[in-house]
Amino acid sequence: MRKIFLILGAVLGILVAAGIFLFLQLNRPTVTEVPVAIIDIPAGTVLKPELFRVARMANLDQQTAAKWVTLADWSLAGNKVATSDIRAGFPIAKTQIDPESSILMETRLSAALTGTNEYYLVVPTGPDEVGNYIQPGDRIDLIINVGGGGGGALTLPPLKEGEQEGEADLSAGTDITQTIPPPVTKLVVQNMTILRIDRDKAQSSSSASSNTQQSQQTTPALGNVKRLYFKVDRDQLEVLSFVLNNGNPRIAVRAANGSQDALPTDGVTWDDFARWFYAQRDNRADGAKPFTPISPYEPPNADQ
């Protein structure tokens, strides 16, 4: 009988130990190892292990972990290019990686060009022109402003007397020379993709406490934009060269989810602006009306 009790006691002891072990295992936190940026990493940087440290995160929910690059997923990010800035202390979102990018892009940006009729153009710029919230992958348009401080008028193809613009018959009749005096503003090249952005080196800022007079280091911001690299095709090269060397070019950033269509535009001349100005100034039911509104603007009572 004593032997039976000893056996039962041993079995119960094993069951209790197994229960405690299972309880501890079930309540032990699940640890996920996640690469976290050591410094601010600008968009366009090739992602390498030395730019990150490994953070151990307990009980990271699966929905969040699926959107981040974990240590187990590092092959997805290693030697790929970041498509947006990664701030110090943050992990890499999978949406911040260009899966088609090559490590060659770090030293040879032409590797980002896949078409035989593609080029990239380098344009100096600054935060006063494009701001600091622009990223590789954004699409831009280029506007030229000509005149305003002198310069000759634009001469258009001649029209015959009595004909409408765009319907000229050059075979006979009296030539009518059309000129458009400066200033002139025109959207000339549309939907160019930014491949890379060069920035100045970030400057760390510090602030002193009024009570302790101790300097406290703050998180450094990314440096100012100083140079854009954007993709163009052969047909755009000469137009871009003209725009960048004549007049006053300006860059406009397109909506990230906007249309990629390159639609023709009217442009704006001084006469257009003056007509719009006076129409707006005296836009009453019994006042002056504009001749042809600047598209897409349609003033009230334009049909009267």
Image (cartoon, grey):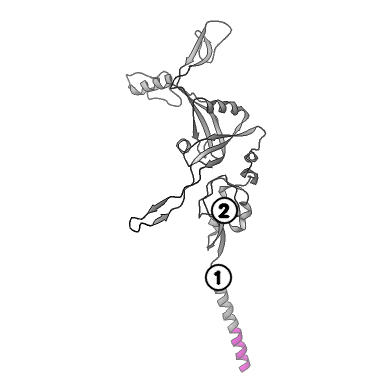
Decide which of 118, 27 is in the foreground and name it: 118
Say if 109 sits above or below 47 in the image.
above
User: Label 1 amino acid?
Assistant: Leu
Query: Quarter holding the N terminus?
Result: bottom right
Q: Is mark 1 on a helix, strand or loop?
A: helix
Say if 261 sits above or below 196 in the image.
above
Task: Name the quadrant containing residue 290.
Answer: top left
The residue under label 2 is 51
Q: What element carries label 2?
A: helix
* Magenta span dominant secondary structure: helix
Instruction: Give residue 248's position: percent from left, percent from top.
Output: 48, 27
Q: Does the magenta stretch include residue 298?
A: no
Q: What stretch is highlighted in magenta?
A: 1-12
- 223 displayed left or right of 102: left
User: Label 2 amino acid?
Assistant: Leu
Can residue 1 be seen here? The reply is: no
The residue under label 1 is 26
Residue in the image at 65% along x and 40% along y: 111
Q: How many marks?
A: 2
Query: Quarter holding the C terminus?
Result: top left
**How busy is the neighbourhood of tag 2: few (under 14 within 10 Å), some, or many (20 plus)?**
some
Can residue 159 be seen here? The reply is: yes
Say if 112 sits above or below 245 in the image.
below
Instruction: Give residue 211's position: percent from left, percent from top.
Output: 33, 58
Q: Which of marks 1 and 2 is nearer the N terminus?
A: 1
Residue in the image at 39% along x and 22% along y: 276
Instruction: Give residue 273's position: percent from left, percent from top.
Output: 41, 22
